[in-house]
Amino acid sequence: MSKIVLVTGASSGIGKSIALYLSSKGFKVYGTCRDPKKYDIIDFSLLKCDITIVNQIKDVVSFVLKKEGRIDILINNAGIGITGPVEETSESDIKSAFETNFFGPINIIKECIPSMRKQETGLVINITSVMGYFAMPFRGVYSATKSSMEIIGEAFSMELNKFNIKVVNIAPGDFKTNIISRRINSPSVPKSSYEKDYVKSINSANSHVNNALSPIIISKLVYKIINSKNPKIHYKVGTFIQKFSIILKRLLPDRLFEKIILYYNKN
């Protein structure tokens, strides 16, 4: 019997790559996005769900459970980027980022737990970010949302362990997706003290994404995790320097690591 997979944010990027790859491996995949009518996808079912709206989360989980009787794997991929100096980023933009990257994933996990507990098995995979392990200039809010998701994932893992529900966090570095077009870019205020550095930083970040790795790498890792009897809680995936930066933060004095990040941010 094919396992039933629910992937949030599956209309493009990493989510679409995961959904297509798992479909090709024989899984029954349901993906979600805000407006399925915009996309012509036939390899898996694409359902309407805005991850920030609790009633839509309830509806999509209920739909899959009624149709299939179970959800074996939840992949929390829906997310949004956000850039800008923290000082100049509006409270509404910060809240919007947390609604999508933190509260939404929590709510859909909570909605899936009862059926997984009844099944006495389940797997939740949260797509976070290597930037959840350290901050970078003008991307602090994004880092905060992903860091929060890493920690809440650990808590879920411990709390759900006795129900045989595994929770895994995958932290990708830069991958070639359309995140740039969907990112909240906080506008610079007139005569902003940050404008020159902000523009340079974002241009550098955009260049890294445009020349990044293919998301199929993450899709293959997800497949490997699904087939693992005892998966790890944390996985990091990306270039050597992105993954090594996490180790450096643990080893180096804070100010020295900060200097390295500032240098990398300018190049």
Image (cartoon, rainbow, N blue to C red):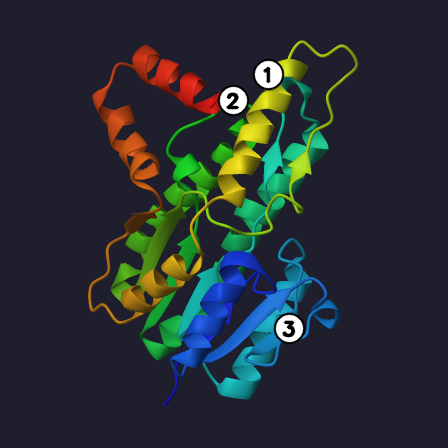
Residue assigned mark 3: 47
Q: Is residue 125 above or below residue 144?
A: below
Q: Is residue 229 left or right of residue 123?
A: left
Q: Position of residue 169 (x, y in %)?
A: 36, 51
Label annotation for residue 197: 1
Query: Could you say which is closer to the camera, residue 118 or residue 85?
Result: 85
Residue drawn at the location 45% of the way across and 78% of the way down: 23
Residue 210 in sight? yes
- Whether the residues at callouts 1 and 3 have beta carbons within 8 Å, the answer is no
Asked if labels 3 and 2 touch by Cβ distance under 8 angstroms, the answer is no
Which residue is disc 2 drawn over? 137
Based on the displayed image, in which of its 4 quarters is residue 138 positioned?
Answer: top right
Query: Badge 2, how many Cα within 10 Å: few under 14, some, many 20+?
Result: some
The mark tally for this picture is 3
In the rendered view, tell whether residue 155 sits above or below residue 116: above
Residue sitting at x 44%, y 27%: 135
Amino acid type of the residue that numbered disc 2 sits on in the rendered structure: Pro
**Residue type at numbered disc 1:** Asp
Q: CA distance from mark 2 to mark 1?
A: 9 Å
Q: Residues within 10 Å of mark 3 (few under 14, many from 20)?
A: many
- Tell whether label 1 touches label 2 (CB within 8 Å): yes
Relative to 50, 234 lies left or right: left
Residue at the location (45% across, 63% down)? 75
Residue farthest to the bottom, as pictured: 1
- Cα separation, mark 1 vs mark 3, equals 40 Å
Mark toward the start of the polypeptide (1 vs 3) = 3
Image point 56% across, 87% down: which residue?
67
Secondary structure, mark 3, is strand
- Of pointers 2 and 1, the one earlier in the residue sequence: 2
